Image (cartoon, rainbow, N blue to C red):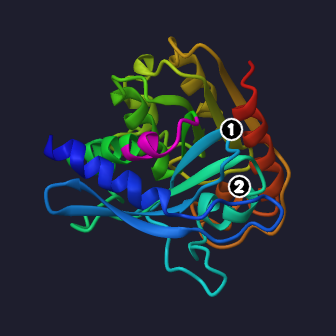
Amino acid sequence: MKRLRALLIVAALLSSVPSAHASDSPAGNVVRIETRTGVTVPLYTVWRSDALATIILFSGGAGGYGPIGADGWPGSGNFLIRTGKLWAAHPFNIVMVGRPSDDIDLSDGRVRTGISHGLDNIAIIKAVKLNSAAPIWLIGTSMGTISAAAAAIADQQALVAGLVLSSSITAYKIRGAVPTQDLAGIRVPTLVVYHEHDACWACRPWEAKNIASALKNAPIKKTLMISAGTGASGDNCGAFHYHGYIGVEADVVNQIAAWIRQPQS
């Protein structure tokens, strides 16, 4: 009963966020929900009354969405976060997952597949479901794919409608790497997205097909390989290299959004 009351309070808070419209991509609001006793997770949310889906975004690295900029949008350079306005051009509710208040180390794959993070994600998904009947899609990029895959596997109540894994962690030396998880436990449409020039040692593009073949119970699955893009710079595993779809962000977002609206092999 205590948890139910907490979720109802969360739903009321989330419902207070103004509706978004694709034409002007207005900024959203930050709300905090209690996910574990004494622990809260901030969510950057944009809601719209005509949403066809709600996308929950798990960023890479140590997680989070960065500071809110002057334009009202999160300032992280992570692919999923810096493209917030591009996602808002589609009929989706947007939920960007922040870092929990107890500061668990989300740069560690063991933490992303651990009990605490799992409880956080269950609470987030339930809170989102209370606020909107739109189908929930989990989208993770880089280290965020560990979180998204684990959350989809743990979903025993069929709250999640679909999954997108972008620049997945495939290196087995990283605990929780996507291929090491029980991918047969994923029972929703799943899109695997990679850039063929991704040079990150932990996300080898040629291993993308291994992920798709392991999704034995996903009703629909597809591997999308991206080849375009320019301006790669910095760390090969960084947000502004091919690993983060530099120079081709709009096309990647549009292709993912189209697949969410109509999944097909």
Residue 155 visible in this rendered orientation of the protein: yes
Quadrant of the drawing holding the C terminus: top right
Q: Taking 24 as reference, is 141 left or right?
A: left
Residue 22: name its quadrant.
Answer: bottom right
Where's residue 98, x and y in %? 41, 63
Residue 231 percent coordinates (x, y): 81, 69
| Tags 1 and 2 touching, CB below 8 Å | no
Identify which residue, 85 or 235, lies in the foreground: 85
**Most prominent secondary structure in the magenta stretch?**
helix
Q: Is residue 142 above or below residue 216?
A: below
Dot 2, crowdedness within 10 Å: few (<14), some or many (≥20)?
many
Expressed as whole percent of the image width and height from the top left, the position of residue 185 reads: 40, 19
Label 1 environment density (alpha carbons within 10 Å; few <14, some 14–19, many ≥20): some
Q: Is residue 130 magenta?
A: yes
Amino acid, disc 2: Trp
Residue 151, magenta (yes or no): no
- Disc 1 on helix, strand or loop? loop
Label 1 or label 2, whichever comes before in sequence order: 1
What is the C-alpha distance between the residues marked 1 and 2?
13 Å
- The amino acid beneath tag 1 is Leu
Q: Can you tell which mark lies on residue 87?
A: 2
The span picked out in magenta is: 127-134
Q: Residue at x 83, y 57 (%)?
A: 229
Residue at image coords 26%, 68%: 101
Q: Residue at x 43, y 31 (%)?
A: 152
> In the drawing, what numbered circle is on residue 52?
1
Q: Is residue 39 above or below residue 180?
A: below
- Residue, far bottom: 70
Splitting the image into 4 quarters, where does residue 85 fall? bottom right
Q: Is residue 44 left or right of residue 244?
A: left
* Disc number for residue 183: none
Residue 60 in sight: no
